[in-house]
Image: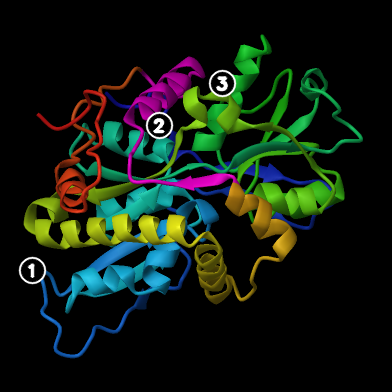
Amino acid sequence: MSAARPLTTLRTIAVIAALPLLLTACGYGSKSTDDAKKTAVPAGAKKLSADEVRIGYFPNLTHATALVGVQEGLFQKELGGTAIKTSTFNAGPSEIEALNAGSIDIAWIGPSPAINGYTRSNGKNLRIIGGSASGGVKFVVNPKKIKSLSDVKGKKIATPQLGNTQDVAFLNWIADQGWKVDSQSGKGDVSVVRTDNKITPVAYKSGSIDGAWVPEPTASKLVAEGAKVLLDESTLWPDKKFVITNIIVSQKFLKEHPDVVEAVQRGSVKTNEWINANPEKGKASANAALKELSGKALPADVIDPAWKSITFLDDPLASTLNTEAEHAVKAGLLQKPDLKGIYDLTLLNKVLKAEGKNEVHDAGLGTP
């Protein structure tokens, strides 16, 4: 089924008072940052079935598997003579657009844009092939204005984008409080202000917003500006686990180059294993990658608490993706979707078995 009101075609503009900026939440038509980069392949290395694989991800800590895997050469080691071309994105819809256009082949992405991309194409454009991260999302607020959960009513709270994963989570939380908000405009008992993560700390500092429901490292950047964590989203989920980042692939690329997809998947599994075995080195590697992309590393008071709140794992936590889809339906942002076939965990389970790890499950949403 297609979305009731296609999220990915909407552009939401928020004018932040006291800021000389016009903020446009990225939608379809938005572009990736101009940082496409091709890695050097080892001399004499055997090439797989494709000359290169084009990988997309965000310059976020919740995408650290991709950041570290590229930074440490762990993906390239598995790909041999097949080069990696990387591109970073600021929002899921633009990444889905790039996947649909054939500009990238594999991507790290949040659950909501993956769901939207799958349903809008009637299940023909992508597959989720693995998990990458859980957690790393917090509701942080100005402690002078909001001292308890009940104080949120009537306040201005930022989310990264209309219909993105954190926006859906916050709208669902608002509904659970018994409050009313129009999901499209963000107006109601709480003002939901869709704001690019890059701008949110500035908006908070200016007093234009009273808090934000955001991923890391934005949440910890706000805390460094004096905000306090009112709620960690992980506390709302069973076992405190919920998918924040998946790995997706275009169905065309998966069909034509399964050996390349398997190599990237193996690189992801080995990267997560390395991060979990070497958390401090993993954190430093991710920060080095962020510095290369943005020109500035994260300070310790930001990256240390942010890193601790993220769990890196291979399991896509499929049941939680289904729940997040239900939350989008509840918020009026999505018609009840048919997600059957959104997962193809065949290659992931092949890799996990070879590594002596437990296989993972697709919650009944795998390919027939």
Instruction: Identify the amino acid type marked 2.
Output: Pro
Q: Position of residue 267 (x, y in %)?
A: 28, 62
Q: Which residue is mark 1?
A: 49
- How packed mark 3 is, by other alpha carbons closer than 10 Å (few <14, some 14-19, many 20 or more), is some
For image coordinates 14% across by 32% down, the residue present is 367
Q: Which residue is mark 2?
A: 6
In the image: residue 157, left or right of residue 317? right
- How packed mark 1 is, by other alpha carbons closer than 10 Å (few <14, some 14-19, many 20 or more), is few
Q: Which residue is mark 3?
A: 172
Q: Position of residue 302 (x, y in %)?
A: 70, 57
Of labels 1 and 2, the one closer to you: 1
Q: Tell me if residue 265 can be seen.
A: yes
Q: Position of residue 160 (x, y in %)?
A: 59, 43
Closer-to-camera residue (217/117) = 217
Furthest toward the right, the residue is 144
- Which residues make up the magenta segment? 309-335
Closer-to-camera residue (46/330) = 46
Cα distance, mark 3 to mark 1?
44 Å
In the image: residue 131, left or right of residue 162? left
Furthest toward the bottom, the residue is 43
For image coordinates 17% across by 79% down, the residue present is 81
